[in-house]
Amino acid sequence: MDSQDRIIVLGVGNLLLTDEGVGPHTIAYLLERWEFPERVELVDGATAGLELINVFQSAGHIIVVDTVLGGAEPGALYRFHPDDVPTEVRYRTSIHQVSFIDAWNMTRLLGPAPDIVIIGVEPEDMATPHVGLTQTISARLPDIEELVFEELARYEVRPVRLEQPDAIGE
C-alpha cells in the first residue's frame, strides 16, 4: 500500500495527568468500539516527541487528538491545522518536552509531509496526577469520535461497529 493512502489517527498526551491524556484515551475508546480498514492505523503517541517524525512520514493523512488550551469552557472542541496557529504563539498545550508540532515542523523540513488536522479538546484538569479523564471530558468522547469520523469520511473511510458483548445475565 502506498504511504500516501495511509491514514493515521494519532492520540497524544500524558495518561498520568487526567485530561492531558485525552488523545490516548480517545484511541482506546475507538479501538474498543470500531474496526478500521487496513489503511487506517490508530496510534497512541503518548508523550512522544521527535519519534513522531517516523509516524508522520509513514502516512498521507494524519488526524491528531490532543488537549488544547484555547480559553474556552472545559470540553470545548476545536478543529484546526498547525498553520492556523499564529507564528508568535508557541503551541504548547502540555508537558511534552518536544511537542508533536515541533515534530511536524521537522517533518516538513525533511521533505513531503502528510495532510494534518488537529482535533483539540479544552481540558478541565491537567494538573492532578490521575489516570483517567474528568467526567466533563469523558462525556465528550462520543463527540470527539464523531469529529474523527467526519475527517475519515473525507477519505471515504467508514469504520465498522464491533459487536458489543451482552451484559452479564442476558
Image: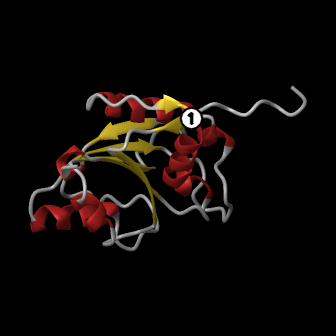
Display colour scheme: secondary structure
Name the residue rendered at 26%, 57% in the picture: 89
**Which quadrant of the figure has residue 138?**
top right
Task: Please say if 127 is above or below 2.
Answer: below
Q: Where does label 1 land, which residue?
A: 140
Examine the rendered structure and indicate whether residue 35 appears above or below residue 154.
below
Amino acid of disc 1 = Arg
Q: Which x, y percent locates residue 33? A: 58, 36
Q: Quadrant of the C terminus?
A: top right
Quarter of the figure with residue 32 = top right
In the displayed orientation, state which residue is furthest to the right. 169
**Toward the viewer: 128 or 54?**
54
Residue 115 location, x and y as percent? 20, 46
**Which residue lies at the image location 63% right of the left edge and 30% below the top edge?**
163
Assess disc 1: are there few (<14), some (14-19) or many (≥20) residues with their C-alpha within 10 Å of its C-alpha. Answer: some
Left or right of residue 108, residue 72 in this image:
right
Residue 108: give x, y in percent of width and height: 14, 61
Q: Helix, strand or loop at disc 1?
A: loop
Q: Residue at x 55, y 56 (%)?
A: 21
Q: Give percent across and percent down for residue 81.
A: 24, 44
Would residue 91 be found to the left or right of residue 77 on screen?
left
Residue found 41% across the figure and 69% down from its top? 48
The one nearer the camera, 85 or 170, is: 170
Q: Residue furthest front?
A: 1
How many numbered circles does the render carry? 1
Residue in the foreground of this view, choosing between 57 and 147: 57
Question: In the displayed structure, would residue 118 be above or below residue 109?
Answer: above
